[in-house]
Image (cartoon, rainbow, N blue to C red):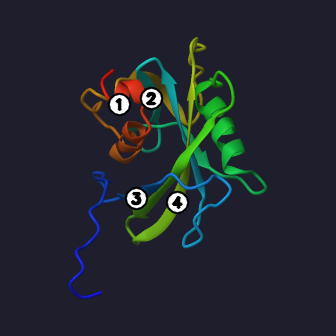
Amino acid sequence: MPGESPIEPLAVDRHGNVLVAFSRAAEGAPPEDAPLPLALVALWRGDSVLLVFDRRRQGWELPGGIIETGESPREAASRELLEETGQTADGPLEFAGYAKFLLQPDQRVEYGALFTGNLAHPEPFRDNNEVAAFRWWDPTGPLPEGTASLDLHLARLVMPRGLADGT
């Protein structure tokens, strides 16, 4: 509409992909204006979140991936976490919200479901085809080099309350 100011993106990565919005809508009511092909996990250990180094994209990002046919976003998040890192959360993953992305090069809009969880005692990393390494990152600090800034912005949005407000 004329006179409206454009929506300010939450984050933009080095490829021009945009995190447009993050909605804490109900898990059972996904957005219907674009596909929901992706599930991500922000897994916390104290004040740090788990990141994986993706071999294909050559960058640090949250564990997650494509939702397979017949699979719920929650099932995909749990499966991807285990496949990529060998980790399972202490208890069920919690639904955090839906992230809306504008992806390049074709300006494609899609959503990702974001889940959170905690892990007190991580298992050793298991090398696999998708992920070269994993690390724990303090989201109040600087971004690791080669980081998928959209994912890390999402991690910062869902930081545990005490960490987010400095207590």
Q: Secondary structure at mark 1?
A: helix
Dot 1 and dot 4 residues touching (CB under 8 Å):
no
Mark closest to the chain's N terminus, 1 or 4: 4
Circle 4: is it few (<14), some (14-19), or many (20+) Cα within 10 Å? many
Q: Which residue is mark 2?
A: 160
Q: Secondary structure at mark 3?
A: strand
| Residue 96 in the figure: left or right of residue 68 | left
**Cα gap from disc 1 to disc 2, whole angstroms:** 6 Å
- Give the quadrant of the N terminus: bottom left
The nearer-to-camera label among 2 and 3 is: 2
Mark closest to the chain's N terminus, 3 or 4: 3
Q: Which residue is mark 4?
A: 111
Q: Looking at the image, which is closer to me, 20 or 144?
A: 20
Residue at image point 33% right, 38% down: 147
The nearer-to-camera label among 4 and 2 is: 2
Q: Amino acid at mark 3?
A: Ala
**Cα gap from disc 3 to disc 4, whole angstroms:** 10 Å
Mark closest to the chain's N terminus, 3 or 1: 3
Q: Which residue is mark 3?
A: 21
Q: Which residue is mark 1?
A: 164
Q: Secondary structure at mark 4?
A: strand
